[in-house]
Image (spheres, rainbow, N blue to C red):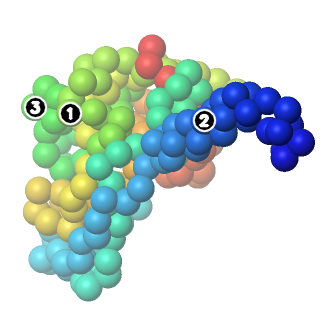
Amino acid sequence: MKSFCSKSKASCLILVILILTSCVYCEAQKCRPSGRIRGKQAPPGQCNQENDSDCCVQGKMYTTYECSPSVSTNTKAYLTLNSFQKGGDGGGPSECDNQYHSDDTPVVALSTGWFNHRSRCLHNITISANGRSVVAMVVDECDSTMGCDEDHDYQPPCPNNIVDASKAVWKALGVPHDQWGGLDITWSDA
C-alpha cells in the first residue's frame, strides 16, 4: 500500500475513507444487547409452558435488546411456536388488534426491533423454510426488552431474531409435528 500511496496520495486518501466508511456502516448494522434483567420465579400456576415455553429462573440474568438484525429480502431468523388463542402460552390478546387468534390462522409475533413500534402490525410477511413458503400476518410483539413479569407470562425476554408463529405456520411449512418448536428460517415483508 505504501508504493500505491506514494504514487497517488488522493487515491490513497479515497481508499482509506472508503474502508473507514464501510467499517462504520458494518458496525451500524450490528444489534448489540441493550441491557439485562434478573429473572423472577413465577407464582404457582402463573407461567404457561404450553409449546415448551420457558419460565424465568429466579436470579438468572437475561439479555435484552431494543434492536433486531437488519431486514432484507432474505432475513435470517429463528422460528418458534406460540399459541395466540385465549389461554395459550402467548398470554393476553395480541398487541396489534387486542384480539386472540386461532392456532389454525397463520399469524406471528416479531422480536421488538422487527416489530418496530407496531409499524408491521397487521401486515403480512413471507416465511421460508423446509423448501416451502407461507404468508403470515404480524399480530404481536415478541418482547425483547422486558420479561419475567406478569405482563409477559413470567417468560424471559425474546432473543432479537425471533418469528414466533402459530401452529398454522408450522403446518404450512411442512415441518413434522415432532420437530415443532425451533427452526432456522428466512423471512421478508410480503
Front residue of this view, candidates 83 and 62: 62
Q: Which residue is mark 3?
A: 98
Q: Residues within 10 Å of mark 2 (few under 14, many from 20)?
A: few
Q: Residue at horizontal 64%, vertical 24%? A: 132
Label 2 residue SS: helix
Image quadrant holding the C terminus, namely top left
Amino acid type shown at disc 1: His
> Taking 31 as reference, is 3 left or right?
right
Q: Residue at horizontal 89%, vertical 42%? A: 3
Q: Which disc, if any, is residue 117?
A: 1
Amino acid type shown at disc 3: Asn
Q: Which disc, if any, is residue 17?
A: 2
Q: Residues within 10 Å of mark 3 (few under 14, many from 20)?
A: few
Front residue of this view, candidates 100 and 94: 94
Front residue of this view, candidates 82 and 70: 70
Q: Position of residue 82 (x, y in %)?
A: 35, 45
In front: label 1 or label 3: 1
In front: label 2 or label 1: 2
Front residue of this view, candidates 177 and 47: 47
Q: Position of residue 92 (x, y in %)?
A: 13, 45
Label 1 residue SS: loop
Q: Position of residue 18 (x, y in %)?
A: 63, 33
